[in-house]
Amino acid sequence: MRFYTQRVPSSIVQQLDRGFADFFRGMATPEPVCSSDPRMTVLEFDDRYEVEMDVPGVSAEAVSLEMEDGVLKVVGKRPAPEVEANVKVIADERSRADFCRSVQLEKDIETEQIEAELNAGVLRIRLPKRTEAQSRKIEIRRVGTVQTSQQS
């Protein structure tokens, strides 16, 4: 499994990211740049993958999902907060940027059975594995009897 984003734990890098985000905030871009926001959790079970993302304030209509060649792509638009004209914003650390997250899964997904739900700001995506791709225990049938030779 491969994520298309990478986090570098560095305050300098974080400051640069914030600086670029502030500089480009409000400029129209044709497609959101994939980033590490929103954070996601990817779980693998025997029969499925599950992806969870925190997307508070984002409606289901503002999110689109696409699965192609084993890559799950989640694209969303965050609503701009409404502020009255006579109100001065003192601090605003909430992200308004549209988001795009991609994660490389195996190509063994039943794409027709993918389900997603958005509840309380958490997007949950269930990606069932193909039946033939799931591991299973194989029972050995007994045919005839096995004779052992005993020496006296």
Image: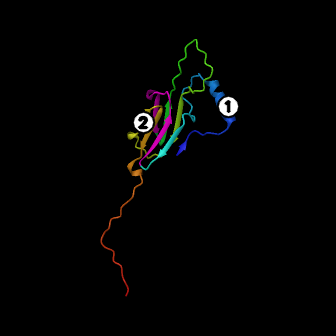
Residue furthest to the right in view is 12
Graded by Cα atoms within 10 Å as few (under 14), some (14 to 19) or many (20 or more), the crowding at tag 1 reads: few
Q: Position of residue 22 (x, y in %)?
A: 63, 25
Q: Which residue is mark 2?
A: 116
What span is colored magenta in the figure?
47-67
Of the pair 100 and 52, the residue shown nearer to us? 52
Q: Quadrant of the C terminus?
A: bottom left
Residue furthest to the left in view is 144
Q: Position of residue 113 (x, y in %)?
A: 38, 40
Asked whether the viewer can see residue 105, the reply is no
Horizontal relation, residue 8 to residue 76: left or right: right
Q: Which residue is mark 1?
A: 16
Q: Position of residue 93 (x, y in %)?
A: 60, 26
Residue at the (44%, 27%) spot, across then down: 61
Residue at the (48%, 28%) spot, across then down: 58
Task: Using the image, determine if residue 112 lies above or below residue 83.
Answer: below
The picture quadrant where one finds residue 34 is top right
Within the magenta stretch, is there residue 74? no
Horizontal relation, residue 39 to residue 90: left or right: left
Q: Position of residue 2 (x, y in %)?
A: 54, 44
Q: Are marks 2 and 1 in contact (CB under 8 Å)?
A: no
The picture quadrant where one finds residue 24 is top right
Of the pair 107 and 121, the residue shown nearer to us? 121
Within the magenta stretch, is there residue 65? yes
Q: Which of disc 1 and disc 2 is earlier in sequence?
A: 1
> Label 2's element?
strand
Tell me the CA gap for discs 2 and 1.
34 Å
* Dot 2 amino acid type: Ala
* Dot 1 amino acid type: Leu
